[in-house]
Image (tube, rainbow, N blue to C red):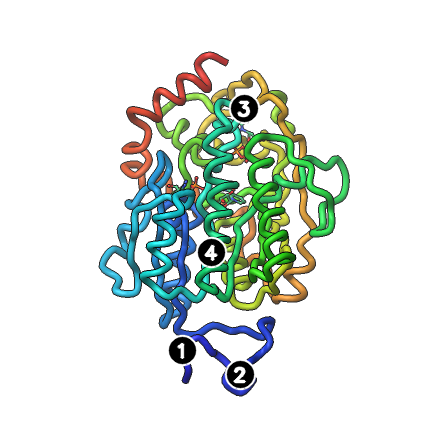
Amino acid sequence: MIPGLANPSIGFPFPINDWILIAMKILVTGGAGFIGSNFIRLLLQEKPQWVVVNFDKLTYCGNLENLKDIQGEKRYRFVHGDIANKQAVDTLLAEDHFDAIINFAAESHVDRSILDPSPFMRTNIEGTMVLLEGANKYQIKKFVQVSTDEVYGSISRGSFSELSNLSSGSPYSASKAAADLLCLAYWNTYKTPVSITRCTNNYGPYQFPEKLIPLAISNVLEGKAIPVYGDGLNVRDWIYVEDHCRGLLAVLEKGKPGEVYNIAGSSEKTNLDIVQTLLKQLGKKQDMIEFVKDRPGHDRRYSLDDRKIRKELSWKPLYNFDEAIKLTVNWYSENESWWQRIRTGEYLKYYEKMYLSR
Ligand code: NAD
Ligand code: TYD
């Protein structure tokens, strides 16, 4: 069997759409964060012949503890570095021959992008460009850009399809939209084989406790109130992180270059629904909810139509919200030391700035 050619019966050269990868070497950027670490774990489990290099800058939310259980795995290696550093990316790509790149590396929190947008522009836009340049120079066969439903902006009725216009509402989503446009421009201009995924809000193990669900659970476990922005009626569509990662794997293996794939959880909830569910699961009273000043420019509702990935790549979520939110609450309850180590020092300064002044 030829490494990298999974279906030899197709013959070579084979159409890139029919690509099914075997014995692949994958560069995962931002793999020490929430979704990236869950993805690496899933990939090593589902693809016993694949090898993974995790390239991560270890910003405030990058945490090697998220991958502690796989540190001894021979098919996994960590490299400390910044995707916006051209020299570092070039050195990495020159040393190792990668078949594919999947880019998770990002500044990912809307509230932080409101406080200071500049790191978002550097990592999310410039960093993506550096990776695309590297993909061209080293003839990478597949590039997956992990993007977000937030690039479409808010929608009052119906759902966005992959053909909908981009209309970002925050500096974070504007930086992700710019990166998406760059990826499509590289496909159009250089035929860089990029596929883009746009997913809804994730939840599950190892999410940094500045995002709604882990923040709410850890606050309650510490006896603190849950801050709910505005009237609490903003709607997000929630997906369990493992389902997102399975969608990403499907796109990595079978996604077409130049195409966008929406990935949805099909579980739209108001923020109030979410925190009420969490309080119920934790056996606490609803008076732990504290309404605070709204986020500026707060998008009202996100909603995706994901029929394309379901039809073309045979993906669908395996978890329903009720069971996966229980798994999530249990995980944070059983792994207090993980989030308690985070909720010190810098985190407390951020928390104070964000909430105590609201
Ligand atoms: P995260 O903030 O938990 O992790 C981001 C990771 O990227 C961290 O490990 C960080 O150290 C690393 N990183 C940041 N800047 C870097 C740089 N310049 N070079 C190398 N590494 C760098 O984010 P996440 O929630 O895991 O999100 C991962 C990706 O998925 C992001 O691109 C985000 O836009 C996208 N996404 C997230 C969600 C969600 O609900 N969390 C939904 C849809 C899409
Ligand atoms: P968040 O987890 O920050 O994700 P995003 O802004 O990318 O959707 O927030 C999810 C929703 O919860 C969003 O509408 C903002 C709201 N929210 C609160 O009400 N309180 C909080 O403390 C946080 C962090 C978010």
The residue nearer to you, when weighing 347 against 101, is 101
Residue at the (41%, 46%) spot, across then down: 83
Q: Are marks 3 and 4 in contact (CB under 8 Å)?
A: no
- The quarter of the picture showing ligand 2: top right
Amino acid type at image mark 1? Pro
How much space separates mark 4 and mark 2, taking CA atoms? 24 Å
Residue under label 2: 12
Number of the label disc, if any, that sits on residue 182: none
Kindly state the secondary structure of the residue where label 2 is placed.
loop
For label 1, the SS is loop
On the image, the x and y values in percent for residue 349 come to 35, 20
Question: What residue is drawn where x is 51% and y is 19%?
Answer: 290
User: Which label is found at residue 102?
Assistant: 4
Which class describes the residues within 10 Å of circle 3: few (<14), some (14-19), or many (20+)?
many
Disc 3 marks which amino acid? Val
Circles 1 and 4: CB atoms closer than 8 Å: no
- Label 3 or label 1, whichever lies nearer to me, is 1
How packed is label 2: few (under 14 Cα within 10 Å), some, or many (20 or more)? few
Across the whole image, how many numbered discs are drawn on residues?
4
> Which one is closest to the eye, mark 3 or mark 4?
4
Q: Is mark 3 within 8 Å of ligand 2?
A: yes
Whole-Å distance between the Cαs marked 3 and 1?
51 Å
Most extreme residue toward the left is 72
